Image (tube, helix red, strand yellow):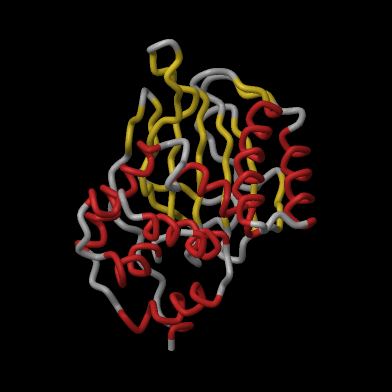
Amino acid sequence: MSSSHCPSPLPSVTKLQVDCVTFPPSVISPASSTPLFLGGAGVRGLDIHGKFVIFTVIGVYLAPVAVPSLSVKWKGKTTEELTESVPFFREIVTGSFEKFIKVTMKLPLTGHQYSEKVTENCVAIWKSLGIYTDAEAKAVERFLEVFKDQTFPPGASILFALSPNGSLTIAFSKDDHIPKTGKAVIENKLLAEAVLESIIGKKGVSPGTRLSLAERLSQLMKENKVEEDATKTDNQDEANDLSLGDKLAKEN
């Protein structure tokens, strides 16, 4: 039975260095104490007066089960095919496996600046789809409250852990250290998904992270022996779960 199958082994991946920020091959999630592997990393920046200015460097980690889960549908696809595939990244965002995001500052930011921009993006998505409810409004208020008194000098990091049940754990670090527990937990699946969607989605702020994920996952899935029975249950759960990705898919 699927509930008794062995956990997927941690994939063997390399560290990534992006603009002098090093992301180790694996981390321990502050939400679950589970080891997660480095799926990809890239920068977030803007073209300002003809010069590309990097604000943050972002790493995305995934639970080991993500590889066999994604392999069922996406194994054999090239990096280019995956990079251009909206459904592939929606499956990462909405998949029933843990994700962890590390956002490291290159330029100083206040918690207010960061949280206002993130929630602005989330609310815009929800309102365009008609899914902005009181629950989401309260989740946004809580998100802003958590960040209100924070400051992030260069080298500091904002950490997000997205659990399979939809909770969003938020933690902060002044250096490369990842705390064992989070500062706050927000129980809102749409918010958790929107945070990741805003980074790696079709209009995400870090195309480099999106490309990096496609490159590494394409190779990992190529090496993976797909166990159909072990992933069917998870895929059915995802199909039954009306999440942000499902609603976005209906719009397109």
Residue 154: percent from left, percent from top: 53, 19
Q: Residue at x 57, y 59 (%)?
A: 244
Q: Is residue 116 above or below residue 83?
A: above
Residue 100: percent from left, percent from top: 51, 49
Q: Quadrant of residue 178?
A: top right
Q: Work out which residue is located at the far bottom of the displayed protein and give it.
A: 1
Q: Quadrant of residue 165?
A: bottom right
- Along the line of sight, the residue nearer the viewer: 151 or 198: 198
- Along the line of sight, the residue nearer the viewer: 19 or 117: 117
Q: Is residue 195 above or below residue 114?
A: below
Left/right placement of residue 151 relative to residue 8 reads right
Q: Is residue 58 above or below residue 73?
A: above
Residue 119: percent from left, percent from top: 66, 40
Numbered disc total: 0
Q: Residue at x 45, y 48 (%)?
A: 201
Q: Quadrant of the N terminus?
A: bottom left
Q: Residue at x 61, y 22 (%)?
A: 109
Q: Work out which residue is located at the far top of the displayed protein and give it.
A: 49
Residue 177: percent from left, percent from top: 53, 35
Left/right placement of residue 110 relative to residue 79 reads right
Left/right placement of residue 3 relative to residue 39 reads right
Left/right placement of residue 40 relative to residue 124 reads left
Q: Residue at x 63, y 30 (%)?
A: 114
